[in-house]
Amino acid sequence: MIVDGRIKVKSGSEIDHFTEEGLKFKDGNDLKADVVVLCTGYGDIRGPVRELVEPNIAKKIVPIWDLNEEGEEQGAWREIGAPNLWYTMGNLAMSRFYSKHVALQIKAKQAGIFGKRYSAPVNMD
């Protein structure tokens, strides 16, 4: 419904307050709305991860939840660009499912049978 224009998305300005007809934004714009859905919490997770590791490791962390040039998921449920640093995330169902994949990758590395992973070049922005 977003693609066909029936649902509108607004970002880039904070909400100042609700009005009788919708929203008033801090940039002065008004938006008429029947329903307002606030989608929060989805940002670049590299920031908090970078705060936990040394700077030389932090600069190696690839974008997470982003797709590479071939449409392959980057970062989630695999090493995130720095040796032996793994990341898994998502809702409970995804975390339970993919935790087994991550565990198998770590076990294969520890056993010396992991091998070379095929991976397209990564944009580090």
Image: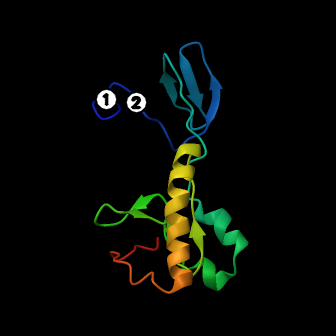
Q: Are marks 1 and 2 in contact (CB under 8 Å)?
A: yes
Pointer 2: residues within 10 angstroms few (<14), some, or many (20+)? few
Residue at which label 2 appears = 8
For the residues marked 1 and 2, what is the alpha-carbon distance in whole angstroms? 6 Å
Q: What amino acid is labelled 2 in the image?
A: Lys
Quarter of the N terminus within the rendering: top left
Residue 24 position within the rendered picture, expressed as x and y whole percent measured from the top left: 58, 27
Q: Nearer the viewer, residue 7 or 61?
A: 61
Q: Nearer the viewer, residue 45 or 76?
A: 76
Q: Is residue 69 left or right of residue 124?
A: left
In the rendered view, tell whether residue 1 sits above or below residue 53: above
Q: What amino acid is labelled 1 in the image?
A: Gly
* Residue 115 location, quadrant: bottom left
Residue 78 position within the rendered picture, expressed as x and y whole percent measured from the top left: 49, 68
Residue at which label 1 appears = 5
The extreme right residue here reads 52
**In terms of secondary structure, where does tag 1 sit?**
loop
Pointer 1: residues within 10 angstroms few (<14), some, or many (20+)? few
- Identify the residue at image location x=53%, y=65%: 102
